[in-house]
Amino acid sequence: MNFDYLLRRLTGRLRKVLIRISYDVQFGDRVYVSAGAHIRTFDGGRVVIGAGCDIHAGSLIEARGGVVTIGPRSIVNRQATIVAGERIEIGPDALIAEGVTIRDRHHARHTKPYNLAGMVGAPVTIGVNVWIGAKASILAGVRLPDDIVVGAGAVVTKSPPQTGILLGVPARLHRSSNGEGSAACVDAG
C-alpha cells in the first residue's frame, strides 16, 4: 500500500468520527464520505447511512428535525442535496446522480408572505435499485417504486403508479422498465 492511499483512508475515518461526535449520524461498515461532503442534523434530527455507501464531495445531507435513512451500497454523487424535516428513506443500491435534490418539505403556498408561511410536507420513500438522473428533483410526499429510473432534470411531484422511466417537468411515466408499453406518456399521479 502506498502512503497516499493510507492517508486518504485515515482522513476518511477521522471525518466520519468527527461527524458522529458533532451530529446524530450513524454509519454502517465501509461507508466512504468524501472531503467536502456535509452531513448535519438539527433539532433532534437523525441520519443513518447503510454499509458500503459512498457520499461524494459537495453533497449535503441534513436532517432538520426529521430522519434521513440511506440504504446499503447506495451512492450520493457530487452536489446532491437531501434535506428532511420529516422522513426520507432511500432503499439499498440507489444511485443518486450529480445535483439531485430530495426534500420532504416546502413553504406553505396559501399564506403570504411565503417566507413567513411556515413549512408543510410529507415523507419521501425511494425504493430498491432506483436511479435518479442528474439535477432531478424529488418533492414532498413522493414514493418511488423499486427499479425505477428518473431522467435527468425531471421534477417528480407525484408518486408513479408503477416502475418505469420518469421524464419531464412535471415528471411523467414514459414506459415500463421492462420496455413494454406504448410510447405515449402516462400521468404519474
Image (cartoon, rainbow, N blue to C red):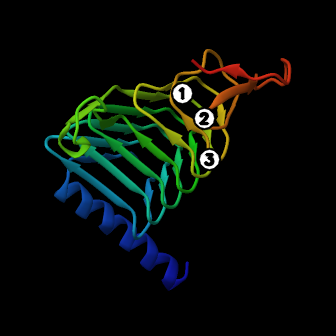
Residue tagged by mark 1?
Answer: 127
Which residue is most to the front? 112
Quadrant of residue 83 in the image? top left
CA distance for labels 1 and 2: 6 Å
Q: How many marks?
A: 3
Q: Amino acid at mark 2?
A: Val
Which residue is most to the top? 161
Q: Amino acid at mark 3?
A: Gly
Quadrant of residue 107 in the image? top left
Question: Which is more N-terminal, label 3 or label 2?
Answer: 2
Q: In the figure, 98 relative to 34: above or below?
A: above
Q: Nearer the viewer, residue 53 or 68?
A: 68
Residue tagged by mark 3?
Answer: 153
Drawn side of residue 169 relative to residue 88, left or right: right
Mark 1 neighbour density, 10 Å: few (under 14) some (14–19) many (20 or more): many
Q: Nearer the viewer, residue 94 or 6?
A: 94
Task: Give residue 118's mark.
Answer: none
